[in-house]
Amino acid sequence: MSFEQYLVMPTVVELKAEEKVEAIRELSLLLCKALDVKKQKTIIDEILKREESASTFIGQGLALPQARGPIKEEFAIVVGRSMAGIKYDAARGALAHVIVLLVARDDADNNRQIQILSELAAFFKSDAVREQILSYEERVGIKNIIASLKKGVYEEKSQKTTTKKNINPLINSTISLARDVKASAIMVFADTVRENDFLEQFKLKPKLILVTSNKTRFDLVSEKKVAGLLQAPSIPASRTGQMKIGILLALSRNLLGREDRVVCLSGNSKNGVFDTIVAIDIAMEYEFFFSTAQNILPPDVKPEVLERIVGLAGEIAVEGREGKPIGTIFVVGDTNTVNAYVRQLIINPFRGYSEAERNILDPGLVETIKEFASIDGAFIITGDGIVLSAGSYLRPAPTEELPPLPGGFGARHAAAAGITVCTNALAITISESTGTVTIFKSGVIMMSISRPAVREKSMVQRFL
């Protein structure tokens, strides 16, 4: 992991504090002492100021406070834990058990900072990592955890043999089918299984695309055979939903094209077994993706921004807020044109904050987005992920070009479709009544993803 070089303390700090402010102060003082920083108060005040505007708790017992300050290195990271949990002013009274403090130098690159935050979020949300950090060992080393994960993967590879017992027949069938239909790629939904040994069965051709909610498990090992690694929503999806999301994201990153065929391999993560193989002709099955333009994304929208918004939409559809379902709209891209058709319903809660503080790629903004999703209106987001406003009323220009919407779609979907007709933006809606996530482009429904049936409360809680 690239953040490893910025760890200023090799071991996880055992936090004595019980409240957020004391915990942040405790970690900050340790970091400043390790780096011989004299202006400790400057850094602490900056962190607390950010916490006042929005909590950096991102769920699953993890908080990522951050600040900029007078340090020599570009970034500095220190990790603390509390077995009992720290009151962190999080939604639904959730406690923070792991706090990762990131301090960036005053002139550090904003994009690099967001990238590191994303890496930290993915790494520390991993079940394997959290289990080791929250074990009852007195000294837990982050670099040791990274090394053990790497070693575990390598040892697993060396111990695997090519006996019939270890060969998954469904993978062989997938490879055979890909060869028979002349597929340009095989797409594997890796969250189905917990181990990475399935990669050993795949050859260099056709190219392999992995879809996963946890990129960390593949970042630890360099796999030349993996042509693409796509970030899937962390909420469980049906097999059909998995494939829709995977194809969309692969097309947005130009890993697949209109004329390609792809073979998808998926399954049920609860059982941990691959059980479904589907061959897809992109032009035939997803022609509506290309109904108005050759490219899936508007020219100013980054693929990682689409990944994050689709993931957030899926989480909001399943979780709701305070136990109640909610619906909202994300409008992304072509914001100069979009703003001409927007009126604020409320005072814009994102106004006055720096772009670094309102970038949707920052995992610390997730809870804020979910909180404001309960407000009527839309989020307006630039193609590179800056949230311009929330609670925005869309007033698209009247047009006869808008195709009729399916039955059951209301004003929210009509507004989303309308704004994409008069602008070059994408609109992603969440239905309050059904939880269906719908993506609009040029007034046309590009994709609808049904809310997965999550019957067990504990399963939903896992993602909070």
Image (cartoon, rainbow, N blue to C red):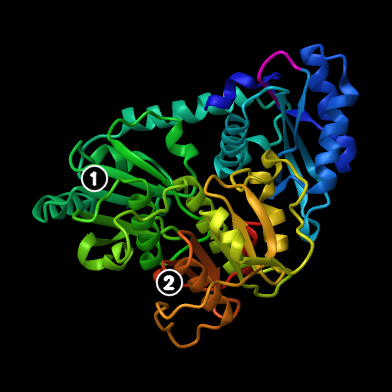
Q: Which residues are magenta?
A: 71-77
| Quarter occupied by the C terminus | bottom right
Q: Position of residue 443 (x, y in %)?
A: 43, 71
Q: How many marks?
A: 2
Q: Is residue 340 left or right of residue 226?
A: right
SS of the residue under disc 2:
loop
Look at 40% across and 71% down and name the residue there.
Answer: 445
| Disc 1 to disc 2, C-alpha distance | 47 Å
Left or right: 229 as drawn, with respect to 285: right
Label annotation for residue 443: 2
Q: Report the residue at 65% width, 61% height from top.
A: 461
Q: Amino acid at mark 2?
A: Gly
Q: CB under 8 Å between callouts 1 and 2?
A: no
The answer to if 416 sits in the magenta stretch is no
Q: Is residue 73 magenta?
A: yes
Instruction: State which quadrant residue 442 falls in.
Output: bottom left
N-term-proximal mark, 1 vs 2: 1
Residue that carries the numbered disc 1 in the rendered image: 167
Up-down: is 128 above or below 35?
below
Q: Is residue 160 left or right of residue 88?
A: left
Q: Secondary structure at mark 1?
A: loop
Q: Dot 2: within a 10 Å radius of its alpha carbon, few (fewer than 14), some, or many (20 or more) residues?
A: many
Give the residue type that dot 1 points to.
Ile
Mark on residue 195? none
Q: Position of residue 336 (x, y in %)?
A: 57, 53
